Amino acid sequence: MPRFSRLPLLAVVCLGLATTACKKDDTTPAPTGLQVQAHDQNAMMKIMHDMMMDMGMMTSTMDPDNDFAMMMKMHHQGAIMMAQKELASGSNAEMKTFAQNVVTAQQAEITQLNTFLAAHPAVGPMVMGFHTESMESMDKMDRAADLRVITGNTDRDFAQLMQDHHQSAVEMAQSELKYGRTTSMKALAQQIIDEQTMEIKTLQTWLLTNKGY
């Protein structure tokens, strides 16, 4: 009578699992859920970091209105570049429309800021508070962006990062209302607060509907 070797039950089970694992199943669906992209590979993150570097190198005049105008110009330019990236690479119609509105509105405000700076040389007394608070807001934006889970999906990344970008603009505008001395810049600051606070809500609503995971 032939003799059969006995394998422990656990070994048999493990052998079966290993054999199954080695078989390729072409019907297995592609991974779903949250896909992550390294921050240093993301074009919009690079735009934000480059903008931060440029603003950090700006020479402050300590005139809060002039510093607000100079800093907001650079800040707006960063937003425009991010929006242009969305227009070029995004696929969602709502986000592309949002991006075009950002470009249109902030280019118009840059024109207004340039007109102000050309006609308003820096004047005393010097005020340190605006510059200090604005740089704190920018640092806060930078840290918030670095905590974002970046997906490589242009529409979602644009919506995520533009929230942080807008929030820092709102905070800078609040500092201008606190320290500014000219009617035109204080009026622009209030306009930025009103418009970009509403736009942050729009971005949050879109993200809740289009999380993708």
Image (cartoon, grey):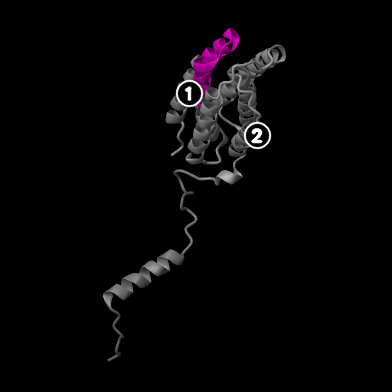
Residue 200 tag number:
1
* Residue lying at the far front of the rendered structure: 125
Few, some or many C-alpha atoms within 10 Å of disc 2 (few <14, some 14-19, many ≥20)? few
Task: Name the quarter where the N terminus is drawn.
Answer: bottom left
The amino acid beneath tag 1 is Ile
Kind of residue indicated by mark 2 = Met
Q: Which residues are magenta?
A: 168-192
Between 157 and 193, the residue placed more toward the observer is 193
Task: Examine the structure image and report whether residue 120 is included in the region drawn in magenta.
Answer: no
Please report the residue visible at 58 percent of the width from the left and 38 percent of the height from the top. Answer: 45
Q: Is residue 184 magenta?
A: yes
Helix, strand or loop at disc 1? helix
Q: Position of residue 200 (x, y in %)?
A: 48, 23
Judged from the image, the secondary structure of the residue bearing numbered disc 2 is loop
Left/right placement of residue 143 relative to residue 54 reads left
Question: Label 2: which residue?
Answer: 57
Q: Is residue 159 visible?
A: no
How far apart, in angstroms, are the residues tagged by discs 2 and 1? 28 Å
- Residue 122 at x, y = what percent? 66, 17
**Are circles 2 and 1 on residues that touch, CB within 8 Å?**
no
**Main secondary structure found in the magenta portion:** helix
- The residue that appears at 43% across and 64% down in the rendered structure is 21
